[in-house]
Amino acid sequence: MSPTPVFMVTDIGHDADDTTALLYAMGLVIRSEIRLLGVVTSGGNNRSRARLVRHLLVTYGLGEIAVCAGAEPGPAWGAQTLPRVHFPGGAARYGRYADSLDPRPSAQFIAEVIGGAGDGVEVWAIGPLGPFADAISGPATGGTRGHLSWGPKDLDPTTVRWRAEPSAEAGIVSVPCPSTDTTPPFLNAVSRLVFQGQHLGGAPSVAAFNVRQNPVAAWVVFRACALRGIPLRLAGKFAAYAVPARRPHLDRIARAVDLPGEMDFVALFRDTIRVFFQNDPALFLEINCRRNQNFDPIHLARFEAGGVAAVDFDALFDGAYALTPLYDPTTLVLARTPALFSLEQHGPGHPLIEGVGQSSSRPGVLDADAVVEALIDGISALGVARSGRP
Ligand SMILES: [Ca+2]
């Protein structure tokens, strides 16, 4: 079978999540399972994020894959900008990639790269959709930073309900609304959009991180897909919670990544997991301690007795069971191997939307171990690529 053409949208650079997912996708490229047409970054600070992507591609001999910094989201999109880009090993080593980013505006890059690929292109979006919406509809005008809510029926209207913050006054943001006549030709090449985000009742949830970061952009993209008959496949957080990696898995990933002295992959995971633990210790321990038989309950007991400060995080991380929030990697394994998941299509929602389960009791993951193994298996192609180089 010829490799599946894939275009990626990522907000790489704030934790181990996107990095792991991109490395998995690169492993699929090396195995000729996919053809990575290009990568665009989103979420804000997009040039920095693009340099991270370039670094990883060049490191594994995939420098021919074009990377474009997404247009920065304006306040009219209601978009949040992630404040910080984490450069593993220090920012200095990534400066040299500034000149090798694709010079085109991201809207043009997306339209030309996807449109030029023929057909059957899968878009794998593991970050906010701002640059992709921009390529479909052009920039929004008006509006203020705020909160957007919509449901399945809102895939059809011509305006978006918009509540501005902090005054909570009702208002309308003006978005060039995709219609059957105006959706751009490059969408003809897209066969599916796989998106990291929760769905509720068949509709994408505005509570999902990648939607919440840029809700208008998500609405534009989902509506355009609905108009063009492009199916959406969504993987939310509950699927990721059902696919935790234990410390030995992380060590195997780190060995497969094989970046000695350049990126301490276990440390990157440790930082990511520490942030999750500190942000929401109750949820973290709920997932790890209450649901998993393998977990040493001493951490939960200490937390209940003395709060976060009473928990020895390093022991927690190194213990028998450590949750890794593999949101983006789980999404890409779903894109590649849907048989490992239980996909639902909802009558009340849009018929083109399918996704994994929507609750912790029904996460839609049929075989969590197989998902982790598929991830490590894909990444392991990277080590082969490096060791085979002169
Ligand atoms: Ca992401």
Image (cartoon, rainbow, N blue to C red):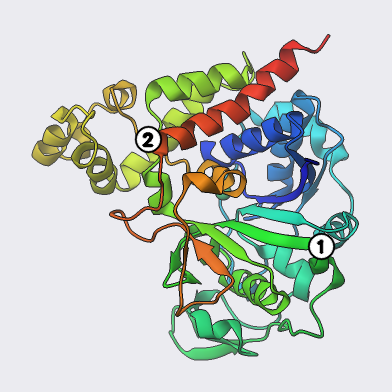
**Pointer 1 residue Cβ closer than 8 Å to ligand 1:** no
Q: Relative to residue 246, is residue 236 depicted above or below?
A: below
The image quadrant of residue 217 is: bottom right
Q: Relative to residue 152, is residue 78 depicted above or below?
A: above
Q: Relative to residue 18, is residue 179 depicted above or below?
A: below
Residue at image mark 2? 274
Q: Say which element carries label 2.
A: helix
Q: Nearer the viewer, residue 304 or 37?
A: 37
| Residue 321 percent location from the top left of the image | 30, 28
**Residue 86 visible in image:** no
Q: Which of 43 and 362 is in front in this view?
A: 362
Q: Say which element carries label 1.
A: helix
Say which amino acid is labelled 2: Arg
In the picture, measured across the screen, residue 93 lies left or right of residue 260, that is right
Which residue appears at 40% of the width and 53% of the height? 364
| Residue 43 percent location from the top left of the image | 62, 55
Within 10 angstroms of label 1, few (less than 14), some, or many (20 or more) residues?
Answer: some
**Separation of residues labelled 1 and 2 (CA atoms):** 41 Å
Quadrant for the C terminus in the image? top right
The image quadrant of residue 379 is: top right
Which residue appears at 47% of the width and 19% of the height? 251
In the picture, measured across the screen, residue 14 lies left or right of residue 10, that is left
| Residue 359 percent location from the top left of the image | 33, 59
Residue at image mark 1? 189
Which residue appears at 56% of the width and 16% of the height? 255
Q: Which of marks 1 and 2 is in front?
A: 1
Within 10 angstroms of label 2, few (less than 14), some, or many (20 or more) residues?
Answer: some
The mark that comes first in sequence, 1 or 2, is 1
Tag 1–tag 2 contact (CB < 8 Å): no
